[in-house]
Amino acid sequence: MRSNKSAFVMTLYILFLMLPIYWLINMSLKTNQEILSSFSLWPTHLTFDNYKVIFTDASWYNGYLNSITYVVMNTLISLAVALPAAYAFSRYTFMGDKHLFFWLLTNRMAPPAVFALPFFQLYSSVGLFDTHIAVALAHTLFNVPLAVWILEGFMRGVPKEIDETAYIDGYGFFAFFRKIFMPLIASGIGVAAFFCFMFSWVELLLSRTLTSVDAKSIAATMTRTASASGLDWGVLAAAGVLTIVPGALVIYFVRNHIAKGFALGRV
Amino acid sequence: MKKTHNQKAWFMVLPVLILVAFSAIIPLMTVVNYSVQDTFGNNEFFWVGLEWFEEILHSERMHDALIRQTIFTSIILAIEIPLGIYVALHMPKNKGFWSSLCLVLVALPLLIPWNVVGTIWQVFGRIDIGLLGHTLDQLGITYNYTQDSTAAWFTIIIMDVWHWTSLVVLLCYAGLQSIPDAYYQAAKIDQASRWDVFRHIELPKMKGVLLIAILLRFMDSFMIYTEPFVVTGGGPGNATTFLSIDLVKMAIGQFDLGPAAAFSLIYFLGILLVSWVFYTIMVNSDKEDAQ
């Protein structure tokens, strides 16, 4: 009885989540004419032309390549600086550690809208405007604090005796960190990478402000095309569907850690 | 865990510090700089002190945006938190194909770029080509989110619920997973009702993650920009102009740097204050649990 009710609730909720996505996929498989002239729950004249446009037009597929480039750069930078910091926070007390930790978190709370204009000026003045690295660095604003927070949560769960035993066994710090500690918190690193990927991938305001041509992200490409050519619904829908794909793949890989990851390792 | 006192740990934090200083402190100082100056162009600035702050604090425009923002955040918190808990209680518990599938599907909206979320709902709500708009229209309900502010609010709220309830679900689900089976068996022996199980076993175990959920949802909904920008552009009129949208209009649209900068600082400090309260509660409850 109870499991039936659960299945019912879940079905209803998932249906609610999937309907708008289904509608987008439905639209991406129709021609513009069909979208605007008739109302149908599924495509009557199935067409893949919208997807063809995206895969053959450089201004579209470069958007995806640019986005993936800065997202990967951001993930690597964030993890590289967050790992030692999270280790320090989880193992040692030092002057001002609690204040520093909260101050880091405040950057996750900063509205990107506040930073849009200063970032634009800062990166223009150092000649980084419209480069991938500019967006990657800008996104570290909220991803580094998050990565530190998640990693610290996972590292707290590793007993300190392991560190001490390793030192007694003659491991140096770096050897210990690479060979023993990192494998132990592998799932934490995976979850942190997932979150960096996610927040960098979904962000629009900063990536749009900091790029114009060479590093234009797919999100910016979509908004600009929508306003310029007006009503190419089919292509817009196809572009939307393709932006969901990387996210879905990434979720699939981390599905077993995702729940704990969303709790930032703090369950 | 007992931590060692070690000042050298600062060196491990240093890279983060340098990076965040570059991407947070320098831009923030620019904002502070603008907030106390005025310009007639040509990069000539002069000192105006706190005038902009006074102007912003007394401006109708800021008050209205703040009120709209507060109402919006309250509504979505009131819907998403209970709904998220409710759905989490019904997630499949045992590991297997179905629970993996549920997890992936539930998490999916969180991974969609925010402007695409906007696009999805912009299309979905249209009367001519969208399923939701068309259905409502067929039912005889007047629904036009570009003209009617009630419909615009409805669209934006349901979009946010669609987009973010899953975060609450996943957090609560993680909290529920950490409850040992023995607790439920004990409750069964005591013949506890379903409500008692929830009230005395599940809710206390979820307290920590629920605080995170409320903190995250508060922060993010208070900063919401992309989704309403794509769907309604802040309209009709100013009906859905939330703080971030207003700020971007002011800073980049009208290039009123002084007021926009003052606005930014007040805005940031406001979020900071509320978040700090949450954070303190959270850290304290962490400590209680540890004892």
Image (spheres, grey):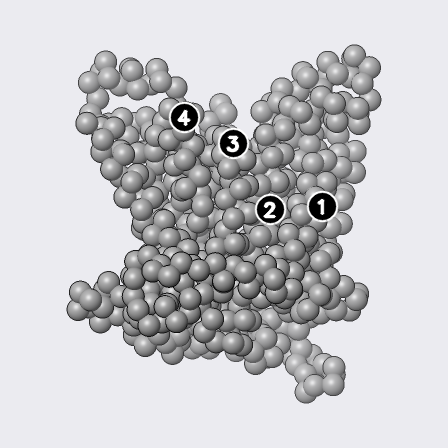
* Distance (Cα) linking label 3 and label 1: 22 Å
Q: Where is residue A104 in the image (x, y as percent from the top left)?
A: 63, 47
- Tell me the amino acid under the disc marked 4: Gly
**Image position of B60 with respect to B92: above or below:** below
Mark number, residue A257: 3
Task: Name the residue carrying label 2.
Answer: A197
User: Which label belongs to residue A217?
Assistant: none
Q: How many marks?
A: 4
Amino acid carrying label 3: it is His
Residue situated in front as seen by the camera: A133 or B67: A133
Please say whether residue B27 is visible from this viewpoint. no
> Is residue B89 left or right of A115 when viewed as pictured?
left
- Of the numbered discs 3 and 2, the one sitting upstream in the chain is 2
Choose top left, top right, bottom left or bottom right for residue B118. bottom left
Query: Dot 1 corresponds to which residue?
Result: A77
Q: Residues within 10 Å of mark 3 (few under 14, many from 20)?
A: some
Place residue B103 in its image quadrant: top left
